[in-house]
Image: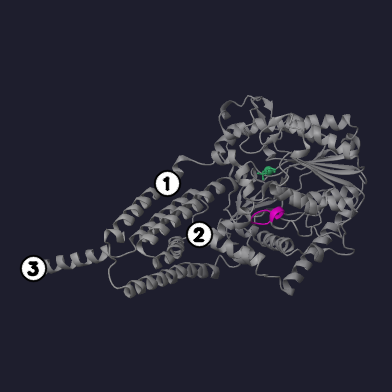
Amino acid sequence: MLTQLQTQARKGLRISLNGLRYFPFWAAALMIVAMLYKLAYLDRHLNVGGMNHWKWEVNLGAMLLAASWTALLGPRARMLALVIVDLLLSTVIFSDLVYFRYFKDFISVPVLMQAGQVSSLQDSISSLIIYKDAIYFADLPIAILMAVWVFRKRSPKRGYKQPGTRKFRLSIRVATAILAFVIGYQLIAIPVAEQKKGWAAGLFEGNWWNIPIYNVTGLFGFHGYDAYRYAKENWLGGGLSDKELQETKDWMSSRKELQKQAESDPLFGAYKGKNVLVVQAEAFQAFLINQKIGGEEITPNLNKLIGQSVYFPNFYHQTANGRTSDADFATSCSLHPVTSGSVFIRFAGHDFDCLPQMLKNEGYGATVHHAYDGSFWNRNNMYHNMNYDKFYNIKDFKIDEPLGWSLGDKSFFRQTVEQIQEAGKSPFYAMAITLSSHHPYAIGKHELNIGDLNGSLLGTYVQAAHYVDEAVGDLVNELKQANLWDNTILMFYGDHDNSISNWDDYAKLFGRPVTELEKSTILKKVPFFIHLPNDEHAGINEKAVGQMDTAPTILHLLGISTENYGIMGISALSSTPNTVVFRNGGFTDGNLFFVPSNEGILGKGTCYSMKDGSVQDVAACQPGAKAARTELQVSDRIVEHDLVPDVREGTAATKS
Ligand code: GP9
Ligand code: MN
């Protein structure tokens, strides 16, 4: 009896194994398994709080969708298609990873449209790749070998005949494709719908940040959503409702009330008609100021100049992945950058109230100076729209000091002062954007004794910053020689962080451990000071301010009312309380510093007291976090739906 049973079992097993041999979708199954492994490996590597427990479902769903259509093909075409799908998806994962290491974000469609940037970042890119990344392509040789095997084995010339009738095969293929598609779709749709009922409510409407979207949808789900978002924004209309438009206008009206308070400040108009020179310094962070290394100051010239200026030690950059262009947009046009890509690229044709135009309305000449390709960040178009009289780009500079990406900042400043003089406009507004201290900072300057930091990226960065500091010292002398120093307001700020978060190196530099709060603030703080003629009003102003507040600050000093303009910032010099909102939904008001969770949940995140760095109950930050979301949404509506003309009040500003 037992032997009979055993024989039957063996027979059954043989039949099923034989059946499995004829299961024509093994290659697809193997590819799906390999991709799931890569996605999980990537998720561990990104370390953005970890996707929730749904991650296997959504990733499996995405892979079933990606592979479903290949079921319709014959064995050889299917094999080829799978190799191509594998290669494409592996390249997407790898590119996202490299991009993430620098930008802390994923590649979205708007970012792809600025692909020119990526080739210019070549030096940086090679420093962002590690040998272990080969794992993302490790299955490809096997896939190719399998393809060769299938091609040879299943060749009709070698007498291979597919099993079953043609009709039978077709029905199996169609049924499998439909089944894989439906299951794949549901594996994504159900977890997304579930999460939207809870913490992800409003996430897809708010669009504050791509990381929480990734945490809900997985990497390929994110790319699918991003493509849909782009199509909706650009091709499918998707305008605002009357209610949304009204809410936006109301928010801006109450903001105007706050902005107006600057007009009763004694400094309002105190520098009417003075020239304005703005220096935007590449990746220049606030921790460099007054910091010593090997007994020497990193920035002696800036330290001295800051002592003669109004200095804001609590100034924050507000950029997202539009980096330099975001800083330029936030400071010049006083609105938030967008969460994906750059306003300069996505919305260069929209109407904004930016400093060059606002000052030209008062009779100023306006020029912008940057020694790099004019098309980078779509500057040619955006600066035309901002109505600068002239954009001095790489073509207008003599490369007499080749350094880093192009021209050294020393020569850049010297030629900028010459260009301002040649333009001969009085009064003038000029914006100078530096470049020498760009990632990966290796400009071959080794003047400081950096001791333990030798060989580290932070050490190289510090050396580059020291060079930029010398260039600023030279700039001051050149402005003095050109007789411009005494009638020019000089404003200086850093554009964004340096992308270095190796805290052990910072600890070596500071000679003490870095606190948890500092890990967030260091990367957000950039220096900001305003030098006024005759060193007037020099001192420290502790107010928490951000890049969006710089344009209103200049208008304040020049006595220009903001009431006819569609801008969001508040003058740093006014006593009006201010909250600095970050693109990821974080904020600081000088007392609290809120770091949102990677899931973007309103009730989650870390709420710090800025007084002692202690962690507070997150509830203390909730009202601020909610207000931050509203502010970001208002700004996004204005930027994306071209609403500046609608939110201006009084006489609309006109382009001359
Ligand atoms: C290049 C410069 C660098 O023109 O603005 O841009 P970034 O990479 O810092 O955004
Ligand atoms: Mn930059």
Query: Which badge, 3 or 1, comes first in the chain's sequence?
Result: 3
Q: Majority secondary structure of the magenta segment?
A: loop
For mark 1, give the secondary structure. Answer: helix
- Residue 505: percent from the left, percent from the top? 57, 35
Residue 129: x percent and y percent? 51, 41
Tell me where residue 118 appears, x and y as whole percent: 61, 46
For label 2, the residue is 220
Task: Decide whether residue 340 is among the magenta residues.
Answer: yes
Is disc 2 in contact with disc 3, using a CB cutoff of under 8 Å? no
Residue 622 against residue 390 in the figure, above or below = below
**Residue type indicated by callout 2:** Phe
**Label ID, residue 2:** 3
Task: Please give the name of the residue rendered at 84% of the width and 35% of the height, measured from the top-left corner.
Answer: 417
Query: Does 229 sit above or below residue 324?
Result: below
Q: Judge whether 123 appears above or below 654 on screen.
A: above
* Residue 590 seen from this side: no
> What's the distance in space between the residues labelled 2 and 1, CA to CA?
18 Å
